[in-house]
Image (spheres, rainbow, N blue to C red):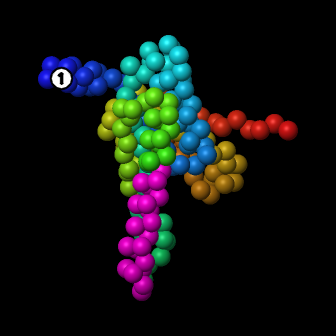
């Protein structure tokens, strides 16, 4: 019993590294990078891993926004979209768990937040008092970024912790 209390106290003292994960190649790379640099891979990673608690957050879109329709027939479509979004989120979390276990990180926490990814990640970072928020860079150009918005850019302006944007290396020819 005392061991569990000591473990719980240790977890409470650990600083949170929050990883935004959408199951894209870029977020998979960012999670792999985080696991390799903070939680696994030799004495340095293992020592750092004992200082941090890993929390992975999947931002699930709201069905009505994902569909982008209203009016007649929308009520029939929304339950189907909600079901599909739940399946996609569950698959993404399963992939993240698999990657963590493969890197000997068995005590990570997983959350599915509903809403716009930018708001989900900033809110989670604030709620969990994250020390670091890690996001992958999709590498959109200026035009796409202006039209779609950039999750990392939004987080850089709104999150009150260290933000780490992990870029997937480009293949050189």
When the figure is inspected, residue 30 is found, relative to residue 8, above or below; the finding is below
Residue appearing at x 49%, y 46% in the figure: 95
Residue appearing at x 47%, y 41% in the figure: 98
Q: Is residue 166 left or right of residue 169?
A: left
Callout 1: few (<14), some (14-19), or many (20+) C-alpha neighbours within 10 Å?
few
- Quarter assignment of residue 2: top left
| Residue situated in front as seen by the camera: 99 or 73 | 99
Judge whether residue 170 can be spotted in this image. Answer: yes
Q: Position of residue 33 (x, y in %)?
A: 57, 31
User: Range of the magenta residues?
Assistant: 72-92
Q: Position of residue 85 (x, y in %)?
A: 44, 62
Q: Is residue 52 left or right of residue 152?
A: left
Residue 84 is covered by the magenta coloring: yes
Q: Position of residue 108 (x, y in %)?
A: 38, 34
In this view, which residue lies farthest toward the right? 173
The residue that label 1 is drawn on is: 5
Q: Is residue 38 left or right of residue 169?
A: left
- Quarter assignment of residue 53: top left
Q: Position of residue 32 (x, y in %)?
A: 55, 34
**Predominant secondary structure, magenta span:** helix
Residue appearing at x 81%, y 36% in the figure: 172
């Amino acid at each position: 019993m005392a061991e569990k209390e000591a473990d719980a106290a240790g977890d409470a003292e650990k600083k949170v590294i929050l990883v935004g994960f959408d199951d894209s190649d870029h977020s998979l790379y960012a999670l792999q990078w985080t696991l390799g640099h903070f939680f696994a891979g030799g004495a340095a990673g293992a020592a750092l891993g004992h200082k941090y608690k890993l929390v992975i957050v999947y931002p699930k879109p709201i069905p009505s926004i994902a569909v982008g329709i209203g009016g007649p027939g929308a009520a029939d479509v929304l339950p189907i979209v909600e079901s599909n979004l739940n399946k996609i989120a569950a698959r993404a979390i399963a992939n993240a768990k698999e990657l963590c276990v493969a890197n000997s990180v068995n005590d990570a926490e997983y959350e599915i937040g509903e809403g716009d990814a930018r708001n989900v990640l900033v809110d989670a970072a604030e709620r969990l008092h994250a020390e670091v928020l890690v996001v992958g860079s999709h590498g959109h150009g200026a035009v796409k970024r202006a039209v779609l918005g950039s999750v990392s850019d939004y987080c850089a302006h709104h999150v009150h912790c260290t933000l780490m944007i992990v870029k997937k290396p480009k293949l050189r020819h």
